[in-house]
Image: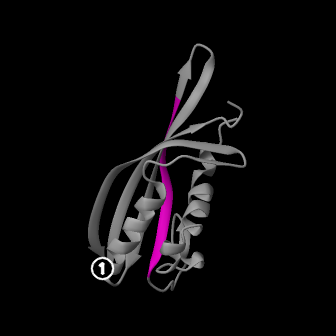
Amino acid sequence: MIQSIKITKYIRKFLLNNEELQKNVRPTNIFPLVANANTNFPYIVMQRTGVRANYSKAGLIDDNVTIEIICVSNDYSQSIDIAQEVRNTLDAKRFRDEDIFIDNIEIESITEEWAENAYLQRLVFNMSIRDTEE
């Protein structure tokens, strides 16, 4: 069974394994959907923004999944460094873990903005999620 709904759980796990990223972002500051109230900078928020299933006559082939990762800091340079480490961790990579096989991760876009007294680096990734039994 393809486990696309669990994607942010696994992406968080992969980010937590990046020692360079942990130099800037505490493990407790990587969140799904929304940061906890009163979270100190810097932090990362991520969300699954789309899942599209691909079928053949034989059935489900894979899911194409889009996730958005937002790196937030009150320091512009630090926000860029964090975003670069996120990209280094995920772009052009494949991961197999427990019940998920993440294939063909590709960066779709990287944008930046200023909001609520913070610098935001927004990275959007597309990936293919396959059945681990293939």
Tell me if residue 119 comes above or below residue 99 in the rendering: below
Q: Which amino acid, by three-letter code, is at mark 1?
A: Ser
Towards the viewer: 53 or 132: 132
Residue at which label 1 appears: 77
* 88 inside magenta stretch: no
Locate the C terminus and report the quarter of the image it occupies. top right
Horizontal and vertical percent for residue 28? 60, 78
Main secondary-structure element of the magenta-colored stretch: strand
Q: Nearer the viewer, residue 33 or 9?
A: 9
Can you give x and y, in whole percent of width and height, for residue 79 in the image? 35, 75
In the rendered structure, which segment of residues is drawn in magenta? 42-53
Q: Is residue 120 left or right of residue 105?
A: left
The crowd level at tag 1 (other Cα within 10 Å; few <14, some 14-19, many 20+) is few
- Whether residue 51 appears in magenta in the rendering, the answer is yes
Please give the count of numbered marks on the rendered protein. Answer: 1
> Residue at left 70%, top 35%?
1
Q: Quadrant of residue 86?
A: bottom left
Q: Secondary structure at mark 1?
A: helix
The quarter holding residue 42 reads: bottom left
Residue 34: x percent and y percent? 51, 69
93 relative to 1, above or below: below
Q: Residue at x 55, y 80 (%)?
A: 26
Task: State the residue at coordinates (66%, 44%).
Answer: 100
- Is 78 situated left or right of 58 in this image? left
Color theme of the render: one colour
* Residue that appears at 34% across and 67% down: 121
Where does the image place residue 59, in percent across and percent down from the top left? 62, 20
